[in-house]
Amino acid sequence: MADEENATVLPVSTEAKKRRAPKAPELPIVERRNWLIHQHYLRKDYETCKVIIKEQLQETSGMCEYAIYVQALLQSTAEPRALILRLEGKIQESLELFQSCAILNPNSSDNLKQVGRSLFLLGKHKAAIEFYHEAAKLNEKDWEIIHNLGMCYYFIKDFKIAEEHLNTALQIHKHDKTFLMLGKVHLLAGESDKAIEVYKRGVEFSPENTELLTTLGLLFLQLGKYQKAFEHLGNALTFDPNNYKAILAAGSMMQTHGDFDVAMNKYRVAACAVPESPPLWNNIGMCFFGKKKYVAAISCLKRAHYLSPFDWKVLYNLGLVHLTMQQYASAFHFLSAAINLNPRMGELYMLLAVALTNLEDVENATRAYEQAANLDESNPMVNLNFAIFLYNHGDKARALDQYQELERKVNQLRDSSSNFEFDPELMDMAQKMGAALQVTESLVWTKPGKDSKSKPHSEAAAKTPGAPLGTNQALGQAMSSAASYNKNLQLATGVSKGPSTSLEPEPGVEDAPGPPADPPGPLEPQDPDGSKPRTSKRKSKVEE
């Protein structure tokens, strides 16, 4: 019986062996572990990935293209061997590995593209352009290659060719990054309208992209279109309540319109995300300034100055606050530093002249006023303060010239804007100045309405034609308050009057501006294109 059982079992065993599937063929040794490298790379298990890559390269004597490619990527960003080196920030080593990949497989557009990317990260944009063009010959429809070409031309400031490549990239494939970069190209080329259209198309394509919404809102804010700005910034905050750029911009709008407490609440949220932002502390400081808490304002502005020591707008605001507190030596210190950084702004020289007047340095105050009058082409306050200064020092002829220039600027601004009106204090001082100079009242000066209230220090002006107009102290105070004579004036001159907001894409975005840090009160005229400022020996120390 046992023999019969064995006889029946043995044939089945032999038959099972015959049915067994044939053994899978072994892969060539060069590619044997590519799947394992790829698997660990996707899992971001870079250490294990690097060990496998090292073993693979030792077995293949460095001839495994995929292993080298991945190693280079990790070396140049922080992820395969070239990929790994890029991921770890070792850009130069990853470049060498990607070049090895390109030698092993010269017909691969991916290898050339990665060589170009490493060169781009090293700041060698012209060399990167050459490799991207070679990669484009192998693959003309690769969006990444065309987009990166546009980025390279952007950094070498060839905006026309950059625009062409970015438009081509959008035709191949629409992408948020391309819309953002194309908009920046238009902004740097001075084409704000085209930039707005590009950002609008970007928002239509990607309505939940907070960076596009914030950037478009900031553009509208700079152009004075507050309703549209608020709409886009609000949408950005809807999708990302912690978007500090949108919070900062919305707060600056409220600050511009005098809602300091609401703006401060916004800034508290932004401070959690970016506690070391110079524009943020600048705006907080100017909120305190608007609330007449000058010590707190100086404390915040000095923190902004510590974080960004070469931002002339923070220095401007510090000078303004010290003038208001009648600390003229400190005001002179900060305004001189601001002029060194921005020697083409007339209003800075005017504030410096106010400080010098109160320091009883008449000669240099005169030179500062002359410089301000030469540089400024739109702000009537420059000519008004200069006229008062000249009148107080007995030079009525030149004071009359400045007064006439003041009226010319006012007429020009009124013609450019139908909704134009002045700060009541400015009108009051100008009327008293005209009476003192025995000038017939011009139609441009209308008396303030019933709701208008002059500020206390405006009474420093003369009450009779023969009396001096304003003391040194009054001049400093007049500047600190009357410079913001109207919101509409800012629109007429096309300059942002609000506090600082950041339109900047970070250097990663291949960035911006930075952000302006304008005070909520004083007007910030644009740099005029006029002639070079005239300087004297003592004045040149301030301008250099």
Image (spheres, rainbow, N blue to C red):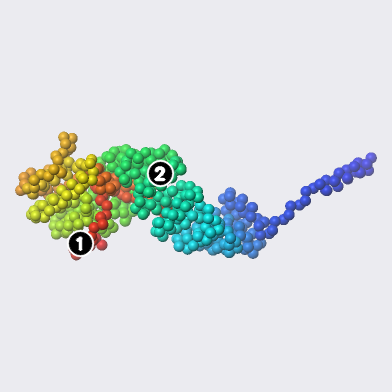
- Kind of residue indicated by mark 1: Arg
Label 1 sits on residue: 534
Q: Residue at x 35, y 41 (%)?
A: 229
- The reply to whether residue 248 is visible in this rendering is no
Where is residue 112? Give x, y as percent: 54, 60
Q: Nearer the viewer, residue 310 or 348?
A: 348
Do the CB atoms of the residues marked 1 and 2 lie less than 8 Å apart?
Answer: no
Q: How many other residues sit within 10 Å of disc 2, few (<14), some (14-19) or many (≥20)? A: some
Q: Residue at x 15, y 57 (%)?
A: 366
| Helix, strand or loop status at disc 1 | loop
| Helix, strand or loop status at disc 2 | helix
- Kind of residue indicated by mark 2: Lys
- The reply to whether residue 217 is visible in this rendering is yes
Q: Nearer the viewer, residue 361 or 343?
A: 343
Distance between the alpha carbons at the discs numbered 1 and 2: 44 Å
Label 2 sits on residue: 200
Relative to 395, 237 lies left or right: right
Q: Nearer the viewer, residue 98 or 13?
A: 98
Where is residue 130? Give x, y as percent: 49, 62
